Amino acid sequence: MAQSLLAHVPADTLPAHIGIIMDGNGRWATKRGLPRSAGHKQGADTFSKIARHCREIGIPFLTAYAFSTENWRRPADEVGEIMGLLRRYLKDTKLHQDENARICFLGDREPLADDIKEMMEQVEHESAHRTGITINLALNYGGRDEIIHAVRRLSAQCASGEFKPEDIDEDLLSRQLYTAGQPDPDLIIRPSGEMRTSNFLLWQSAYSELVFMDVLWPDFTPAHLDHAILEYLNRTRRFGGI
Ligand code: FPP
């Protein structure tokens, strides 16, 4: 492993779950006179490096925002380029094998192309037994959409008499989310200088520490991740207490 700034940090103080909003790909490409797709390609490579680093420093859960429910509004050719990158990524038969990573997908798969859905199922199936790190890829993901799906399922269960409306609590709702069974993100990082969370892990981020960084995602390095974690470690988390 390259020297990490976190070498002396006790493992049990590290975030159990890091979320990343991979932003700034388009600007990275435009600054270089390249098509936006070149930024997404570089962004995908950056993701692989950061996933490896997370595994090396001992982060158990990593979630990356790859495509939002709102990203369909982009020009069709850009959506097509991102889907093409995803195909190439998912086709890798050794995908995150070196990280011993279990790969999960968060989001509504229904509108995705059939071949992508099939590849997602295969990747999930083939990586299900791995224990090094869990990598969640948020694909056609929206926090509001996720909550609506959860509410619909709970309503159906209420209607069929499985439980009463007053039985619904945070735990019951959490169990209907794409992240069911996983810890909430301790730390959410957004590079590119934008200071918003854009419908990412809306429910799960209630007490996440947010770190906004002035670097475009394709330029993001393991050292940037370490700096974000160091900032997280300097925060006092009170979860509403004192
Ligand atoms: C945001 O940057 C990025 C996206 C909407 C797409 C992210 C997708 C990838 C990194 C590729 C797919 C990922 C994997 C892991 C295969 P932006 O385009 O909004 O940037 P801008 O704000 O500079 O325009």
Image (spheres, grey):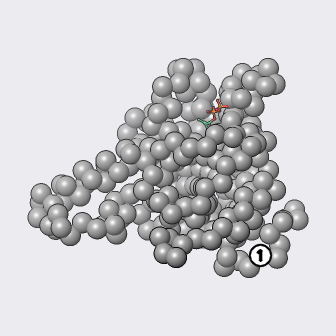
- The image shows residue 19 at horizontal and vertical percentages of 59, 55
Q: Can residue 219 be spotted in the picture? A: yes
Name the residue that disc number 1 marks: 9
Residue at the (61%, 55%) spot, across then down:
210
- The image shows residue 161 at horizontal and vertical percentages of 11, 64
Residue at the (55%, 27%) spot, across then down:
79
Check mark 1 vs ligand 1: CB closer than 8 Å? yes or no: no
Give the image quarter of residue 168: bottom left
Q: Tell me which image quadrant ligand 1 sits in.
A: top right
Q: Outermost residue toward the front?
A: 242
Q: Between residues 161 and 133, which one lies in front from this camera angle?
A: 161
Q: In which quarter of the image is the N terminus?
A: bottom right
Left or right side of 108 for 120: right
Q: Can residue 120 be spotted in the picture? A: no
> In this picture, is 43 found above or below 212?
above
Give the image quarter of residue 209: bottom right
- The image shows residue 220 at horizontal and vertical percentages of 76, 46
Within 10 Å of the Cα at label 1, are there few (<14), some (14-19), or many (20+) other Cα atoms?
few
Q: Between residues 218 and 96, which one lies in front from this camera angle?
A: 218
Q: Which amino acid does label 1 sit on?
A: Val
Task: Provide the secondary structure element on which disc 1 rests.
Answer: loop
Residue at the (54%, 46%) spot, across then down:
197
- The image shows residue 57 at horizontal and vertical percentages of 74, 68
Q: Between residues 146 and 47, which one lies in front from this camera angle?
A: 146
> In this picture, is 111 found above or below 181?
above
Residue at the (18%, 67%) spot, across then down:
166
